[in-house]
Image (cartoon, grey):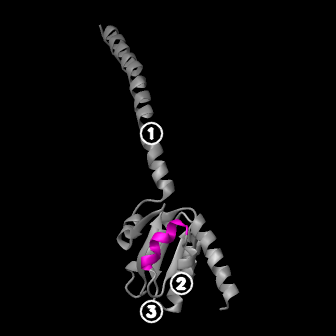
Amino acid sequence: MNKQNKQQVVSEMHEKLTKAKAVFLADFRGMTVGKATTLRNELRNAEVEYRVVKNTLLELACADTDAAVLIPYFKGPTAVAMTYSDPVAAAKVLAKYAKDQTAAFKLKGGVLSGKTITAADVQALSELPSREVLIAKMLGSMNAPATNFVGVLAAVPGSFVRALDAIRQQKQAN
């Protein structure tokens, strides 16, 4: 790779790292080609960009970005997974492969919203429900008091009608 190509890779990665909501690093040493291809396909389906870049180029690309805190993790073979939308979806796929003992894939850490996260944090992030599920739960929680209030308001006239009907039936029986 000549100097011009290296500069192009650095500038391209710098732009991507600046835009990314979350960046995850992994060691893929010993991973078979089949497993790596499957991982790439699953990450692509989760709208995650997965690349292998030389550590020196990645270190240069991280300058003046949130990912600069990841420089201590740039040892050994490093794969970079960047997501521009849902970090939980990316974490789920990566954690699944990190759990698989036959994949030889190890999470190193990452950065999420400017904060460094460890491999254990990525694992915990992967266990969260997706963004859509969390939004649905929140909306359900916000809607519950109004629904309960409407139920209480509807119960009062219903009780009154049932009481009047009981009185009517009692008078007809006499």
As measured in the structure, the alpha-carbon distance from the residue carrying label 1 to the one carrying label 2 is: 49 Å
Question: What is the three-letter code of the residue carrying label 3?
Answer: Gly
Residue 45 image point, x, y percent:
58, 72
Which quadrant would residue 127 be assigned to in this image? bottom left
Residue 86 image point, x, y percent:
53, 62
Q: How many marks?
A: 3
The local crowd at label 3, few if under 14, some if 14 to 19, many if 20 or more residues have their Cα within 10 Å, is few
In front of the other: 106 or 170: 106
Q: Which numbered disc, 3 or 1, marks the residue that appears first in the sequence? A: 3
Q: Is residue 33 visible?
A: yes
| Dominant secondary structure, magenta | helix
Judged from the image, the secondary structure of the residue bearing numbered disc 3 is loop
Q: Which tag is nearer the camera, tag 1 or tag 2?
A: 2
Circle 3 sits on which residue? Answer: 30
The local crowd at label 1, few if under 14, some if 14 to 19, many if 20 or more residues have their Cα within 10 Å, is few
Q: Which mark is residue 56?
A: 2
Q: Are marks 2 and 3 in contact (CB under 8 Å)?
A: no
For the C terminus, the image quarter is top left
Question: What is the three-letter code of the residue carrying label 1?
Answer: Met
- Residue 69 magenta-highlighted: yes
- The residue stretch that appears in magenta: 64-73
Residue name at image x 35 percent, y 71 percent: 120
Q: Which tag is nearer the camera, tag 2 or tag 3?
A: 2
As measured in the structure, the alpha-carbon distance from the residue carrying label 3 to the one carrying label 1 is: 48 Å
Q: Which numbered disc, 2 or 3, marks the residue that appears first in the sequence? A: 3
For the N terminus, the image quarter is bottom right
Against 47, is 101 above or below? below
Question: What is the three-letter code of the residue carrying label 2?
Answer: Thr
Circle 1 sits on which residue? Answer: 142
Judged from the image, the secondary structure of the residue bearing numbered disc 1 is helix
Against 29, is 25 above or below? above
